[in-house]
Amino acid sequence: MIRLRNLYKTYEPNIQAVKDVNLHIKPGEMVSIVGVSGAGKSTLVRMMIAEEPPTKGRIIIGGWDITNIKPKEVPLLRRQIGVVFQDFKLLEKKTVFENVAFSLEVCGAAQSKIKRLIPKVLKIVGLEGKLDRFPCELSGGEQQRVAIARSLCHRPKILIADEPTGNLDSLNTKEIIELLEKINEFGATVIIVSHNKEVVNNLKKRVITMEDGRVVSDQVKGRYML
């Protein structure tokens, strides 16, 4: 599903954010990528979603070599990879329904499809009764559920959650992680980028640990020990 081969990312003047990373993440896996701030986790994510090009190496997503992806091809890639961020990135003046619909509208989806699909997606994330609410009327956990619903609209094969519980309390954190596990059970490959030891260790899934831009540990049912 995802292959990273001899991957490097260097920023000027000579800052190596990612150094010789080699990874293979299989279809349907649930993986945590962990490490302290500055370890290279978010840089890795930005390269996987073609937000930044690698300095050296190759990135292969579902058999597609995106190392030198063309700008016009990026939207197609983003439909295969759903991304959820720590800060939700919701549009404050749009309702729950409109926030989720927006991701489909920018791709030219028909209104009939939007009206049919969004209630189903919101039901998956447990927000079927809050279509007309605005972000300011939702809890942090509910806002993150909207963000997850938005990422699911294109039925992505891969979901990357970059610090998805960073702004949440322990109860909402537990609920969001359970939702990500549910999505994984549906068949999606789920990658959680986190520095939260409790979240990672409770999952009892594969743990990839980064330090100073390198992968220093890759364990099946591993633990976050740093």
Image (tube, rainbow, N blue to C red):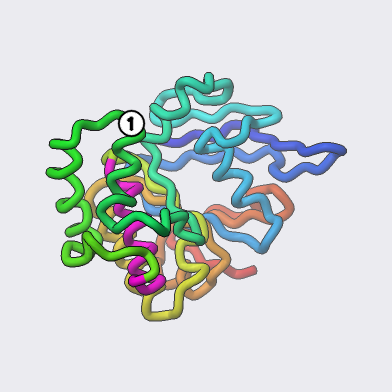
Q: Identify the amino acid type marked 1.
A: Cys
User: Does the segment drawn in magenta span residue 144?
Assistant: yes
Question: 127 or 224, which is in the foreground?
Answer: 127
- In percent of width and height, residue 146 lies at 33, 58
| Residue 112 position by quadrant | top left
Element type where label 1 sits in the image:
loop
Q: Is residue 173 left or right of residue 69?
A: left
200 in relation to 33, above or below: below
Q: Residue at x 39, y 69 (%)?
A: 136
Question: 132 or 27, which is in the foreground?
Answer: 132
- In percent of width and height, residue 118 lies at 20, 48
Question: 5 or 115, which is in the foreground?
Answer: 115
- In percent of width and height, residue 11 lies at 77, 38
Q: Is residue 184 left or right of residue 77?
A: left
Dot 1: within a 10 Å radius of its alpha carbon, few (fewer than 14), some, or many (20 or more) residues?
few
Residue that carries the numbered disc 1 in the rendered image = 107
**Which range is magenta?**
137-153
Q: Residue at x 85, y 39 (%)?
A: 14
Instruction: Indicate the quadrant containing the N terminus: top left, top right, bottom left or bottom right.
Output: top left
Q: Residue at x 87, y 38 (%)?
A: 13
Q: Main secondary structure of the magenta part?
A: helix
User: Does the segment drawn in magenta span residue 140?
Assistant: yes
Residue at far right of view: 13
- In percent of width and height, residue 133 lies at 27, 65
77 in relation to 34, above or below: above
76 in relation to 141, above or below: above
Residue at far front of view: 93
